[in-house]
Amino acid sequence: MVKHLTVTAKPAKQPAMPMAQAVLLNDFTFSWQAASYSAGKVTLEGINKGKQAHELIAIKIQDGLPPEQMRQMLSGPPPAGGPPPSPPPFTFAGGMQAVMPGQKAYGEFNLQAGQYAFICFVPDLASMKPHVALGMFAPFTVK
Ligand SMILES: [Cu+2]
């Protein structure tokens, strides 16, 4: 079978990829430059500077819930005497899957005004605790 194709000039200009802001992932911290983020869609570049795999997940914390209380809920055992709150007092706002040490990846985040936190649930190789319980809970604000 023979088919014809036509070669045309290349498109004028590829749409520019928005510059992704970096978030550094370490054992067991997040660090980044922005004092706060603006509402809207943003692409973040997660760069693993640690010795273990890490992921970059953003959660939007329920309005009025102090981030420290959210950290304790995600880090500790379930509350005694009953199941954890349902629905949970946060929603996922985007992220990227875990990457190995020295690797990076890009995540898409959909941000609205409010309190957020970056978290990582990858289990620690020694204690098997999720990294969020070892310090990988970093609050930030979206304006
Ligand atoms: Cu991690």
Image: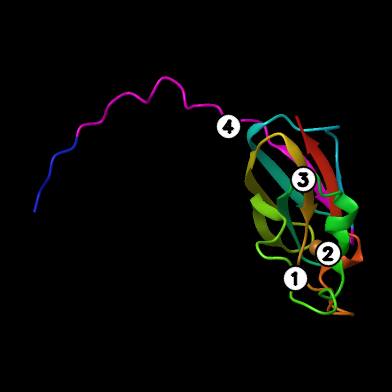
Nearest the viewer among 16 and 10 is: 16
10 falls in the magenta region: yes
Looking at the image, is mark 4 or mark 2 earlier in the sequence? 4
Dot 1 or dot 4: first in sequence order is 4
Q: Earlier in the sequence, mark 3 or mark 2?
A: 2
Numbered disc in front, either 1 or 4: 1
Q: Which residues are magenta?
A: 6-28
The kind of residue on which mark 2 rests is Met
Secondary structure state at the residue bearing disc 4: loop
Q: How many marks?
A: 4
Kind of residue at badge 3: Tyr
Q: Earlier in the sequence, mark 2 or mark 1?
A: 2
CB under 8 Å between discs 2 and 1: yes
Residue at mark 4 to residue at mark 2: CA–CA distance: 37 Å
- Image quarter in which the N terminus is found: bottom left
* Residue at image location 83% in from the left, 79% down from the top: 128
Q: What's the distance in space between the residues labelled 2 and 1, CA to CA?
A: 9 Å
- Whether the residue under disc 4 has CB within 8 Å of ligand 1: no
Rounded to the nearest whole Å, what is the CA distance between mark 4 and mark 3? 25 Å
Main SS class of the magenta portion in the image: loop
Q: Is residue 124 magenta?
A: no
* Left or right relative to 136: residue 37: left
Give the residue number, with chain letter if any, for mark 4.
17
Mark 3 vs mark 2: in front = 2
| Residue 116 in sight from this viewpoint | yes
Disc 1 to disc 3, C-alpha distance: 20 Å
Q: Which residue is mark 3?
A: 116
Q: Residues within 10 Å of mark 1 (few under 14, many from 20)?
A: few
- The answer to whether the residues at label 1 and label 3 have Cβ atoms under 8 Å apart is no
Please tell me how crowded label 2 is: few (under 14), some (14-19), or many (20+) other residues with Cα within 10 Å.
some
Left of 27 or right of it: where is 99?
left
